[in-house]
Image (tube, coloured by chain):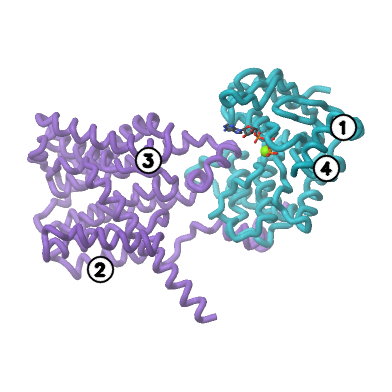
Amino acid sequence: MTAVLETRGLNKSFGALQVAQNINFRLEAGARHALIGPNGAGKTTLVNLITGRLRPTGGKIFLSGEDITDLPPEARVKRGLGRTFQINQLFKGLSVLENVALAVAERDGVGGNMFGAARARRAVAEEAYALLERLRIADDALKPVRELPYGRQRLVEIAIALGLNPKVLLLDEPAAGVPSTESAIILEMIAGLPPDIAVLIIEHDMDLVFRFARRITVLVQGAVLVEGTPGEIAADTRVREVYLGERSHV
Amino acid sequence: MIPPGKSSLKRPPAVEALIKRHRLRPIELLPWAIAVAAYFLFPGYLALGAQIFIMVLFALSLDLILGYAGIITLGHAAFFGVGAYTAGILAVQGWHEPISGLIAAGVAAAVVGLVSGLVILRTHGLTLLMLTLAIVFMLHEAANKAGFITGGADGLQGIAIDPIFGAFRFDMFGRTAYWYALVVLFLGWAFVRLLVHSPFGRSLTGIRENVVRMHAIGTPVRRRLVTAYTISAGLAGVAGGLLAQTTEFVALNVISFELSGAVLIMLIFGGVGRLYGAFIGAPVYMIAEDELAKADPVYWLFWIGLILILLVMFARGGILGLIDQAMHLVRWRRK
Ligand SMILES: Nc1ncnc2c1ncn2[C@@H]1O[C@H](COP(=O)(O)OP(=O)(O)OP(=O)(O)O)[C@@H](O)[C@H]1O
Ligand SMILES: [Mg+2]
């Protein structure tokens, strides 16, 4: 199978700290892939490298076979790369609907329109609303995001990314900070993602990871420790060591 | 698909609200009604009126980049000044037709906005603020040095403007100037209003609210900012051109840090990012200046300073913000 997303020998250091070490990572079309690892392992950094928020110190990134290493972030988005943030990055003063509409408009290429195009605007608003309905936050469509409880804001975070209709979706701890009552909606939503989207999820909750992922990559200190099926990862002694060590001083 | 014609019935209210947000509300016509009424009520103040309209347009242009796009600048008078000198110098050099002179003022300022924007909008925060200051200082000195064409510190004199459309002569009572400035302001307002409600304008708001996320949804952020900056500079240039044409004089302080600060204060008085802040702030500031300076020509800035402190500390949304809060309170009480 061809990789829709691939990194080759990706490196990144912050001064002396190497946060990505020779990372070779592949995401197949329709993948359900989890990226796990202790705090500070470099998971978010990897997402930032892939999306272009950070520039690698070495290595290459490919999206659908095209070298995107030198492309600016927005060009990568245009090619189908969507992400969510570990800590919400929302337009807090704008309504929930508009948060999503901004993304839909950019994806449709009408985000820079100055005049006219009422039809395009309507299409954008309707699509954004349909997305809110899907995530069951349409009731809050007109509320400013900052008035929503964190769990619902987390859904907006995801809705914005989905508004881009991405081919590859990178979810950085989507359920982090969400009370368990509400995380169920998020899990259900993730499970219901269109099968053709390749999804990478960063997650600390092992129940979620093992339920969702068909493949798992374990990252430790910026390097891939092991990659495999959930069964292989569960049985891996090195992974157990990392996680037992981790748990014991949490 | 929803069949056409019935579609608005089936559309969810939230969608409807988003699409129709830019519908004109009656209250938005109030400033224009006041401006027309003022012409008849205060015939002795027409010159001040025209200057107020000019400053409203200037503050409105600032609102586009500061209030909507979140670009903080202390150098906006650079564009106002470039416009004023362009219109003024054209007239002195023999081009007396006002409309084309005004367009030239806007275009010249927009070009300066585009070029400087391409350079300085790579930066943010304090660096950006310093760069906007640096540009206004440099242009001020350049205008000063180029005295042979700008009149330098003595100001640019000898501006003569033809009647508008060959029919409306600029009269000594400032009647023509009043209407001229008002019509240009109206056009500027209609344009900015269209812009801020357009997807482009909303994306500027998105950039102000969260630039990280705008990058992540694929927005060409810098291009949008440079575009907004260019448009805003052009509008400021038109305002400057209006001043040169209506007063037939350009003082060196049109390109100054002081004027940049003053327009910022006007906008903050009225309310930033609300489109109508300029319409409240500029008149309040200028009428206060007029009245306070009459009473005490030296210390009027003291009072402006005091008002600014009170507003910034207790009413971050400016006068419009206060009105909002008051309305909110009234509605809440009724419930
Ligand atoms: N901009 C930066 N400058 C310097 N160091 C950074 C920067 N960003 C991240 N780091 C460091 O890089 C390391 C990896 O951080 P990263 O956020 O990628 O970890 P993570 O695996 O996502 O952790 P978590 O599970 O806590 O989210 C950490 O030690 C972090 O302190
Ligand atoms: Mg992280």
- Say if A138 sits above or below B128 in the image: below
Which chain is painted in cyan?
A
Chain B, colour shown: purple
What residue is shown with label 1?
A233
Residue A59: percent from left, percent from top = 66, 18
Q: Quadrant of residue A171?
A: top right
**Label 3: how many Cα within 10 Å (few below 14, some 14–19, many 20+):** many
**Label 4: how many Cα within 10 Å (few below 14, some 14–19, many 20+):** few
Identify the chain of the residue marked 1, using the numbered disc in the image: A
Residue at image point 34% right, 47% down: B61
Give me the C-alpha separation between circle 2 and circle 3.
Answer: 31 Å
- Viewer-nearest of discs 2 and 3: 3
What residue is shown with label 4?
A206
Give B335 or B55, whichever is nearer the viewer: B335
Identify the chain of the residue marked 2, using the numbered disc in the image: B
Q: Left or right of A114: which side holds A71?
A: right
Answer with mark 1 or mark 4, whichever residue precedes in sequence: 4
Residue at image point 65% right, 61% down: A140
Residue at image point 20% right, 68% down: B40
Give me the C-alpha separation between circle 1 and circle 3.
Answer: 57 Å
What residue is shown with label 2?
B37
Q: Of the residues shown, which amino acid type is indicated by label 2? A: Ala
**CB atoms at circles 4 and 2 under 8 Å apart?**
no
What residue is shown with label 3?
B231
**Label 1: how many Cα within 10 Å (few below 14, some 14–19, many 20+):** some
Residue B83: percent from left, percent from top = 24, 39
